[in-house]
Image: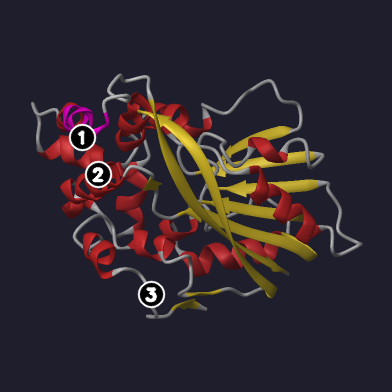
Amino acid sequence: MGTSSSSYLDPEIRELFTPSGPQTDKEIRSLYKGQEMAKHYADHRPGYPPEIFDTIMSYHNEVKSNCHDLAVDVCCGAGQSTLPLIKLFSKVVGVDISEDQIQNLPKDIPNLTAIVGLAEDLSMIESGTVDLVTIATGLHWVNIEKCLQEIKRVLKPGGTFAAYTWTMDQFDDPEVNKYYRQVLAIFKEYYSSRLLIGIEKYKSIIFPFTDLRRCDVTMKVEMTLDQFIGFIQSFHTTKLYYQDHPGTDVLEEIRARMKSILTADCKDDNDTMNVTKDYFLVLGRK
């Protein structure tokens, strides 16, 4: 188990993700603590396409003995991946290292339980009791080998594992798309090389499951300039940039530049830009 060195990523994008940013588990965990960061996540991180959950359930239901009793969403954050599961399973448990993130989950859903804990230590969950384990935009941030072993431990025989994340957004406007790459480059020194694992679609991970399947999912969305700025604000790189550059306002500089390159009919902060969001999904069985 672990990772291999295979890569197919565009060299220009790969070059962005140098190993100069946070690398250790401790450094990574510290990035997502704090109420401000949790609020940015809750407010500005997009949800996941319904097609992802349809695909997961179709795969899960191929095994006739599989139940819909318990689903566990690891690295649940503010619940973007957790909440769609509550209508699909009798009980859903969300696990996240950040108590601040957990606080953003709804507290009035009777079949939802939120637990502060590590992806690498699911000891609060009994072995062989879980029908589905999901981990969305999180696997590349944790100790992959330990996390996958814990997921395998808690799954029932034949239970389903699903890992998914987004890769690179593509804006319909070519000038906006070009500038988006420049925006990413502003924060270059703060990227963790762990991001490459996700952006390269988990191709390097050796999963300890059977019947592995991979699926690409595309979602077309409309994004306002305000939403775009909020999305950038939710990146850990932005947090680190401001720590090193107090008194600056790079987000307002980005906003001003975006306004200058947007077409004449889309210069108001509430006008929309068309964006293609690319996701991928890895499925497996215990």
Distance of label 3 from label 2 (alpha carbons): 25 Å
- Mark 2 and mark 1 in contact (Cβ < 8 Å)? yes
Q: Nearer the viewer, mark 3 or mark 2?
A: 2
Q: Which residue is mark 3?
A: 8
Q: Taking 284 as reference, is 171 above or below it?
A: above
Q: Which residue is mark 1?
A: 261
Crowding at dot 2, Cα within 10 Å, few <14 / some 14-19 / many 20+, comes out as few
Three-letter amino acid code at disc 1? Answer: Ile
Q: Taking 148 as reference, is 247 above or below it?
A: above
Q: Does dot 2 land on a helix, a strand or a loop?
A: helix
Three-letter amino acid code at disc 3? Answer: Tyr
Q: Which residue is mark 2?
A: 175
Q: Position of residue 35 (x, y in %)?
A: 38, 26
Q: Does dot 1 land on a helix, a strand or a loop?
A: helix
Upstream in sequence: badge 1 or badge 3: 3
Instruction: Name the residue rendered at 54%, 62% in the picture.
Output: 147
Three-letter amino acid code at disc 2? Answer: Glu
Image coloring type: secondary structure
Which quadrant: the C terminus? bottom right
Q: Please report the bounds of the magenta region as a residue range.
A: 254-263
